[in-house]
Image (spheres, grey):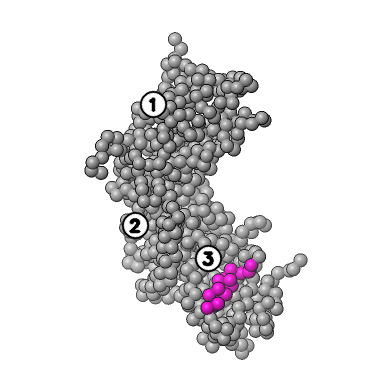
Amino acid sequence: MRKVLTGNQAVAYGAMLSGVEVVAAYPITPQTTIIETLADMQAEGLGDFDYIRVESEHSAMAACIGASMGGVRTFTATSGQGLFLMHEMLHYASGARTPVVLANVNRAPAAPWNIWSDQTDSLSQRETGWIQLYCEGNQEVLDTTIMAFKIAEKLKLPAMVILDAFFLSHTSEPIEIPDKEAVKDFLPTYDPKDIWLDPDNPHTFGAIAMSDPYMELRWQIQRDMEIAKSVIAEVHEDFAHHFGRMYHQVEGYLAEDAEVLVICTGTAASTARVAVEALRAEGERAGLVKIKTFRPFPGEEIIGALKGKKKVAVIDRNFSPGAQGIWAQELRSVLCELSDQERPMVYGYIAGIGGCDISVKTIKEIYYKTLESHRPDDIDMWVGVRHV
Amino acid sequence: MNGERGANKEALFVSGHRACHGCGLALAVRHILKATGPDVIVVTPTGCLETFSSPYGYSPWRVPWIHHLFENAPAVASGIAAALSAQKRNNVRVVVIGGDGSTFDIGFGALSGMLERGDDVLYICTDNGAYMNTGGQRSGATPTYSSTTTHPVGRKSMGKPQLKKDLPAIVADHGTPYVATASVAYLKDLRKKVEKAMTYHGPRYIQIDTPCPSGWGFSSELALEIGRLGVNCGLVPLFEMENGSLTRVRKIRKKLQVTEYLKAQSRFKHLLQEDGSEYLKELQEIADQNIAKYALITSS
């Protein structure tokens, strides 16, 4: 079925089609229409799930973890401040190995108050042990939500589906909505196996682990995050087999013969496709690499795509004060493995903070700046900001 | 379980855990589970209970049990109740057993949310009147003029100046169908209240006075005696409220002066010195108000 949906509606359809059994949610702009759409679905009998109207995001995640430990498929959604309030629970969710799925609509952190797109909220959860999947368009949002359940449940790790505020959350696009039965075929009913709360087979959870077992259990999370790279690739393949749409953790566009590559995530990647085409028309050897997964970080694929290139320009709609753009930092750390001859110079740009537009013009400006520069530390990395 | 004798044979919370000698809380838990039976899932927020009952690899729990964070047990319980409902596992019930710090203070918002939604959870607060797990810091449940490590007695301090938060009343005002207070000093009464709570659906709340030898400062064989003194002086009223109305109280047969209760514990010892008399008077007034409010003494 083809339908025109906003990104937020696409998330709700993804969760409903995945047969979610418990939703716990609290409203926050720009996420709210996700949980409103789910409420409508429940009210109209489209989705057969329990819906807990919690009193905070902290409780939303707590209830999801409780329900997941109870043995059912669970979902919630949030943004910005809501995600920050959940922070403590995010660590717990991965530590308890609960495959909760959360949709985060990127929203800039306060203060000053701002409800627009900025990835600093989700990226600053990078040590919480969540799989993070970024989306470029609404079809990808719907498909990623469904895939997130499969990835999370295979690994017993929670997964976050991430979409840009307003550029996706409140923008409509025509979307192919898969048939519920076909989704069930791809994603069978959740089986908690041995990890759940059952009086017939009582277990003790959340015990105090002394240092040795604690370290062992944390190591297991890292081991499974490594395994996650191949699990995500398999799920992408499997999804393509069922629905004919293929996704990649790292995807190149006109990248093969490019000399300067632009690295983008989220909706900026969509704009960058147009910018790269325009640059090609101007005779430039420009290319794009879009990264979809942040955790686990797809280092090998990135090295594969970037090895031997002269320069790469990373566009970060986020930043870590006192350091730099977060994707650029991550990228530099994996590129260290390459020899001096193979390693591209990494230009890390900060753009689009707090919902500022990243236009075709912005990306072209970044491209030419990178092309003409000799060293990354020679130029101003903040794009489109008044230095007052 | 072969070869087990005595108390452990049927218990759902068995010995071998690491509670202090004479711990009122450990005793309460054993009797709570005796009353609920085995078809429960227990959620415990951070506190003494979690610390002494869960070193990794050992467990006294014979029911499924989950320790979560400090402030979120009601929400975790709501999630589990929703999962049980989604799975149609109607024979299994959810019980929270949490301390006063998590219940009165840090988890109060989550508790209020759970009560307001009407989720099917029995919330039991084991009240030892301070953050005993971390060495006895003041909580919203700490009784007036008790000395704690964060509000200690000193030249300019008589301990906690505020009143204990009246949580049972606040819980009842949410429209909670069953609210009760109990004491480990009266175990049969405690079990009866838990049994009665299990006959209700929706949120239920029981607050149990659990004397703490190390935190309150008394010898470990005296926990039940201290509990009895608290009840019989009027500072720890035992009652039941069903659908908003007071339906039953435990009568005081022989009223004790609060001094009898206070002098037995080092957390109140400063009140028994020369300059403590006016503070003692205030505490006696609190006890007398309780006696009047709940009609704890039958007038003859």
Q: Indicate the amino acid at tag 1.
A: Tyr
**Residue B198 place in picture, x, y as percent:** 35, 36
Residue A196: within the magenta? no
Magenta segment boundaries in residue numbering: A323-337
Classify residue A159 by image quadrant.
Answer: bottom left
Q: Pointer 1: what residue?
A: B186
Residue A325: within the magenta? yes
Quick one: which residue is furthest to the bottom in this view?
Answer: A283
Classify residue B33 by image quadrant.
Answer: top left
Q: Earlier in the sequence, mark 3 or mark 2?
A: 3
Q: Pointer 3: what residue?
A: A163
Q: Nearer the viewer, mark 2 or mark 1?
A: 1
Classify residue A164 by image quadrant.
Answer: bottom right
Q: Indicate the amino acid at tag 3.
A: Leu
Camera-side residue of B95 and B175: B95
Q: Nearer the viewer, mark 3 or mark 2?
A: 2
Figure label count: 3
